[in-house]
Amino acid sequence: MGHVFLSYSRKDSAIMQQVRDKLREDNLPVWTDEKLEPGTRSWKESIENALESADCLVVILSPESKKSPWVREEMNYAEAQDVRIFPIMAVGDEKSSVPFGYITAQWIDIRNPSEFQRGMRLLSAGIRNYLGIEQRESIKPTPPQAAEKVPTIDLAPLSLEASKAVQLLQNPQSKWWRRADAATRLGQIGDSRVIPVLEAFLESTDLDLRYACQKALRQLRGGKEGEPEPGTQTSSPRPANAPAAPKPATPPAKRIQTVKIVITGPFSAGKTEFIRSISEIDVVSTEREITTPAEKEVKEQTTVAMDFGRITVDEELVLYLFGTPGQRRFDFMWEILAEGMLGFIVLIDSSKPETFREAKSILDTFRAYAPTPFIVAANKQDHPDAWSPEDLRIALRVDAGIKLVPCVARDPHSVRDVLLELLYSVLEEME
């Protein structure tokens, strides 16, 4: 791994140090020129070498950095070396701080001290996602006494796919849905040599992971629906005159299948409302007030990280709904949220044709993330200016084979119908 190159104006050194320290706390290597003498030949050569070996560049946007020719040179050189640039807004606004050519780029806002920690978490997540580093729930290592005890097996005889799934399952820092997906995949691969690893998670406190391992073990042992769960004992036939066997104290746990669905779409398409109208829990939301570009004084709410809701379809099926940010400056969260999804919905405000091109771009982006089932939902079909699904299909240039369904995000029945349309395709894919 290379390093994160930090570009800044010397007049913003105090802000730079806060950003530098936070990134290093998150175990990201950071390079700065603070120990070099500005303007010297060795300083320029060091910067060139650091940029050429950098994995990405974080530029601190401010009125001072916009005026700095060196910051602009660093950004230009980074672009020439194909180094990814992550802008963060520290001082000022778009007019005073954002250089020409970056006004439409997504940037993270750390101007408000109360939002600094959240903004830095988003920045770290974006960098880790770009570099392919697993984003961890906690940067601190798991204490030895809390570490999961998982038997080791020889990975060499396993296929590459099985080996990767085992490593992902054994990694306690992996996201829960990725570990559950890994267990499910091991059951599908059918290599019985991984049984000891799956058995180690039968007592896991993570309900989803436990049931994924149970299902995989049934597949590997040739079990069928209705057979006892792995690890349970079957009794021999009871003589006719024998007393009745005592009933178990608790019934066997039901097998629960969890499905992760992502709700995406342009800014203000109704994603949060869609999830909120049907979720059985209070939606975990990361909405923040923003000022719209057209009306400087008008405040609106927008999702900056994700929304989360849950629906229990029946005793064996639970849907997890993840809503994405709609604004492009937060699009680094899209790929993070797309990890492990089994299907996605592109929600469109069918009364705003100016958002259709962005919706098509988002659709193409998510299709590139993973070959999972998806549908397009035409929201606000109760609006007098709403385009019909047929007209939307033409405007978006989507194939006739792609499901494009009408929707009213605030109506739970309408949302249910949209989810069912997608769910049928997801379950068919999982068979």
Image: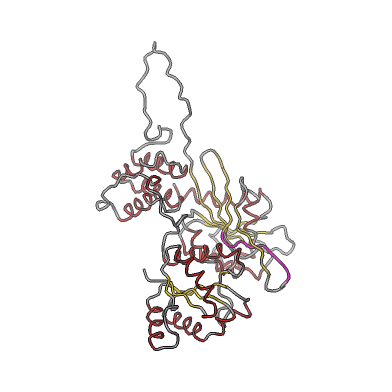
Question: Is residue 301 part of the magenta span, yes or no?
Answer: yes
Closest to the observer, 184 or 247: 247
- With 319 as the anchor, is 217 left or right in this view? left
Q: Give the range drawn in magenta.
A: 297-305
Using the image, determine if residue 15 lies above or below residue 248. below
In front of the other: 430 or 391: 430
Quarter holding the N terminus is: bottom left
Left or right: 124 in relation to 166: right
Residue found 68% across the figure and 69% down from its top: 291
Residue sitting at x 56%, y 85%: 67
- Percent x, y of residue 129: 45, 64
Residue 335 location in percent, x, y? 49, 62
Residue 209: percent from left, percent from top: 44, 45
Give the residue at the far top of this rendering.
241
State how many labels appear. 0
Please tell me whether residue 397 is drawn above or below residue 143 in the rendered image. Answer: below
Along the line of sight, the residue nearer the viewer: 15 or 358:
15
When the figure is inspected, residue 41 is found, relative to residue 279, above or below; the finding is below
Magenta segment, prevailing SS (helix, strand or loop): strand
Q: Quadrant of residue 223?
A: top left
Find residue 280 and report its image quarter: top right
> Does 243 lie within the magenta span?
no
**Residue 349 in the image, given as x and y percentages of width and height:** 66, 63
